[in-house]
Image (cartoon, grey):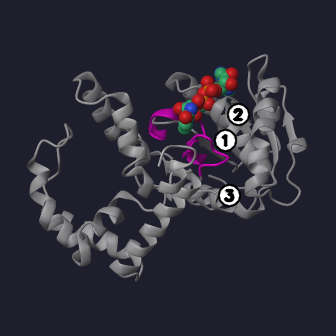
Amino acid sequence: MPSPPCAPDRVRRVACIGAGVIGGGWVAHFLARGYDVTAWDPAPDAEVKLRRLVDAAWPALEQIGLAEGASPDRLTLAPTLEEAVAEADFVQESAPEKLELKRSLLAQLDAAAPAGVVIASSTSGYPMTDMQTEATGPGRLLVGHPFNPPYLIPLVEVVGGEKTDPAAVEWASAFYKAAAKSVITMDRELPGFIANRLQEALWREALHMVANGEATVKDIDDSITEGPGLRWAFMGPCLTFALAGGEGGMGHMLDHFGPSLKSPWTRLEAPELDDSLRTAMVDGCDEAAAGRSIAQLVAERDQGVINVLRATGRLPEQRNEGGDK
Ligand SMILES: NC(=O)c1ccc[n+]([C@@H]2O[C@H](COP(=O)([O-])OP(=O)(O)OC[C@H]3O[C@@H](n4cnc5c(N)ncnc54)[C@H](O)[C@@H]3O)[C@@H](O)[C@H]2O)c1
């Protein structure tokens, strides 16, 4: 792959291809971060819908703070895909999730984009290896998987396919960071990437429970928003569970609750909790703790839960407002 035309933190113009829910969300994000954005979408009403989406998102973006010079006026709608990418320093593709469409669209984008410009797909789950088959320059094609709405949820999962140049993956990760995203760079392809695999495990169990009459839809939603979801906003499931092990942290938690992995607590089968998995979990939590003691983490967790409860009006005193005591 030829070198990208500029450094990741020197990007000025981003092309967004496909301007629906996710493409439009990307457009809003890049505009708010001060980029020039050129969009292309074949739908006849695309421009009206896109400008409506950006206008609706803008007050939220003002609230979280705009980059210097950021403006919805820096959005241009291009009449053709070729014109959309002609002067782009980076391309984000967000067309419908259809494999054949993605294959030919990515090949078209590769043929039209300036040499070296990195092209990312927002795909929710297709491996890039399956999408880059028709492109003559597959080295610059990779996945940049966002979460809805991309202008508020920071995470992007970045991963290349078999024919992707590792330098493109590195460049894209650095670009997204420069564009104020939180990046997970994966070193191998995995269907559903990381976050969607986790969401999907929860989702499938929820569907099983409803199908079997084991819980209602409300029970399932409340079980997360009134329970573990309050912690997950600021502390992931691994570190959260480490605190369930008290002073012994993740090691004690695994020794204590390890036998439960054999119980039918979920329809998803558990892996063997052998020494190497135990060590990976304990070491990973130590790394995430970054020198903080269990007591410090407990204090951070408690403050985090209070912050979330307060921000969402669910502290005990807020729940009682206007109601019977
Ligand atoms: N919706 C989500 O929550 C979500 C989250 C992450 C990733 N994604 C992924 O983002 C991509 C877009 O999904 P969406 O939810 O925005 O879909 P959408 O239906 O809202 O938008 C798709 C847009 O693509 C346009 N389009 C149709 N044919 C096209 C073509 N040939 N070239 C370019 N654009 C074309 C459509 O006119 C439409 O505006 C998909 O790959 C999806 O898997 C979606």
* Residue found farthest to the front: 325
Residue 110: x and y, percent?
66, 37
Q: Earlier in the sequence, mark 1 or mark 2?
A: 2
Disc number at residue 17? Answer: 2
Q: Does the magenta run of residues contain 128?
A: yes
Disc 1 marks a residue whose amino acid type is Gln
- Who's the residue at 26% across and 30% down the image? 209
Looking at the picture, does residue 18 appear above or below residue 4?
Answer: above
The image position of residue 19, as x and y in percent, is 71, 30
Label 3 – label 2 distance at C-alpha? 22 Å
Q: Where is 43 relative to 280, above or below?
A: above
Q: CA distance from mark 3 to mark 1?
A: 18 Å
How crowded pointer 3 is (Cα within 10 Å; few <14, some 14-19, many 20+) is rated as some
* Callouts 3 and 1 close, C-beta under 8 Å: no
Residue at coordinates 78% horizontally, 35% vertically from top-left? 39
Span colored in magenta? 126-153
Q: Which residue is mark 1?
A: 92
| Mark 2 CB within 8 Å of ligand 1 | yes
Which residue is identified by label 3?
3
> Where ligand 1 lies, by image quadrant?
top right
Q: Earlier in the sequence, mark 3 or mark 1?
A: 3
- The amino acid at mark 3 is Ser
